[in-house]
């Protein structure tokens, strides 16, 4: 099976495909843009599914619960952020910084 043989069906098919000219008109039909823009601006909405209606209601309920939870716990959240500055200014004396502990351990290691 030699594909370079000019008598091979594949070679004849590809040679014929190379010679074909595309004479089709590439412009859109008259009024196409107007029709598409009219359909896009139409207010007609199809019937929404039952799942879509319940999903949007569930989203609204979740947002209300989130706002209610933040409003209820606002004092706890605000105290956390007000104490954060004080906690950052206190030097670390409890050994809670793992990087500092690793540097201390590495500086005390002796290689014989």
Image: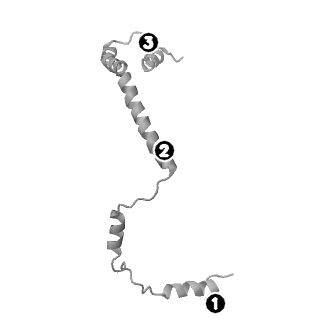
Q: How many marks?
A: 3
Q: Nearer the viewer, residue 101 or 105?
A: 101
Tag 2 near tag 3, CB within 8 Å: no
View extreme (top): residue: 93
Within 10 Å of the Cα at label 2, are there few (<14), some (14-19), or many (20+) other Cα atoms?
Answer: few
Residue at point 34% right, 80% down? 30
Q: As displayed, is residue 56 above or below residue 85?
A: below
Mark 2 vs mark 3, CA separation in Å = 52 Å
Residue 84, picture quadrant: top left
Locate residue 63, reporting x and y percent: 40, 35
Q: Is residue 28 above or below residue 73?
A: below
Figure quadrant of residue 77: top left
Residue that numbered label 1 is attached to: 7
**Quarter of the rendering occupied by the C terminus:** top right
Q: CA distance from mark 2 to mark 1?
A: 66 Å
User: Which residue is label 3 attached to?
Assistant: 95
Q: Nearer the viewer, residue 109 or 69?
A: 69
Say which quadrant the N terminus sits in. bottom right
**Element on which disc 1 rests:** loop
Other residues around mark 3 within 10 Å, as few (<14) / some (14–19) / many (≥20): few
| Residue 52 spot, x, y in % from top left | 48, 49
Q: Earlier in the sequence, mark 2 or mark 1?
A: 1
Q: Nearer the viewer, residue 28 or 105?
A: 28
Q: Residue furthest right?
A: 1
What mark, if any, has residue 54 been given in the picture?
Answer: 2
Crowd tier of the residue under label 1, counting other residues whose Cα lies within 10 Å: few below 14, some 14–19, many 20 or above:
few
Q: Is residue 37 above or below residue 88?
A: below
Mark 3 or mark 1: whose residue is earlier in sequence: 1
Horizontal side of residue 109 vs 25, given as left or right: right
* Left or right of 98 in this view: 2: right
The circle on residue 70 is none
Q: Position of residue 108 (x, y in %)?
A: 47, 14
């Amino acid at each position: 099976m030699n594909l370079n043989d000019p008598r091979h069906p594949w070679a004849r098919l590809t040679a014929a495909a190379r010679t074909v000219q595309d004479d089709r008109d590439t412009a859109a039909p008259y009024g196409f843009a107007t029709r598409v823009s009219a359909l896009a601006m139409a207010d007609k909405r199809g019937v929404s599914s039952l799942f879509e209606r319940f999903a949007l209601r569930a989203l609204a309920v979740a947002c209300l619960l989130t706002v209610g939870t933040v409003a209820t716990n606002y004092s706890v959240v605000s105290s956390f952020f007000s104490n954060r500055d004080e906690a950052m200014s206190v030097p670390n004396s409890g050994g809670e910084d793992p990087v500092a502990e690793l540097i201390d351990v590495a500086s005390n290691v002796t290689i014989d």
